Amino acid sequence: MLLQYLEQGRIEAGCDEAGRGCLAGPVFAAAVILPPDFQNDILNDSKKLSERQRNDLRPIIEQNALAWAVGIVSAAEIDEINILNASFLAMHRAIEQLSIIPDALLIDGNRFKPFKNIPHTCIVKGDGKMMSIAAASILAKTHRDEYMTAIDADYPAYGWKGNKGYPTKAHRAAIAAYGATEHHRMTFQLLDPQLSLF
């Protein structure tokens, strides 16, 4: 059972990211403020839902949220500042765009870089505990998947439509065969460590 609030009576924005472990593509983050009476039987951590369920929930969240936004940090920026800082930056970019300033931020995970003077609470596995974080996880994941499917058309050999940039065997084999693209994160281990380069 997901909780609506960590603290009753304040405006809380749930934040989560998608794409941290990928070899290609940006990291996406979402920030969501849900109305106090929001209810949905399917809402859960995006990883526990099917692609169809996530895609069904996205318009429900976007239409019913008091405010929502998505932040993006490119592969080039990830290489420059590292994936942890890129995840924080993507969340900051999402929060920055919210049409309502929240009283508090609920962050999925155990670390966060404070955003302005808004207090935050880190919640490990928060996307399976808090409604607003679960909603943010769904928006981050669906917006990122949509982006990876779109760029797949330019680079079909890498299978991004299916793997969304994650390090599958086929994705690594395509990098070995065709090299990296401008969407790949050059600071990540792109080739299978088991594969010999000689």
Image (cartoon, rainbow, N blue to C red):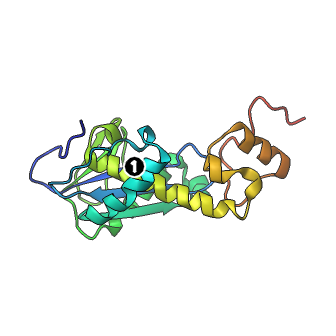
Count every numbered label the image shows and give the total: 1
Can you see residue 3? Answer: yes
Task: Give residue 104's position: percent from left, percent from top.
Answer: 21, 53
Residue type of the residue flagged with mark 1: Ser
Q: Quadrant of residue 102?
A: bottom left
Tell me what residue is drawn at x 9 percent, y 53 percent: 9
Q: Residues within 10 Å of mark 1 (few under 14, many from 20)?
A: many
Give left or right: position of 189 versus 4.
Answer: right
Tell me what residue is drawn at x 45 percent, y 40 percent: 47
Task: Give residue 34's position: percent from left, percent from top.
Answer: 23, 57
Can you see residue 23? Answer: no
Task: Give residue 49's position: percent from left, percent from top.
Answer: 42, 42
The quarter of the picture where the C terminus appears is: top right
Task: Give residue 5's position: percent from left, percent from top.
Answer: 17, 46
Give left or right: position of 152 versus 108.
Answer: right
Give left or right: position of 71 versus 100.
Answer: right
Front residue of 117/51: it is 51
Give left or right: position of 38 versus 68.
Answer: left
The quarter of the picture where the N terminus appears is: top left
Front residue of 4/119: it is 4
Question: Considering the numbered disc 1 on the image, is that residue within a helix, a strand or a loop?
Answer: helix
Tell me what residue is drawn at x 49 percent, y 48 percent: 51
Front residue of 175/149: it is 149
Residue behind mark 1: 137
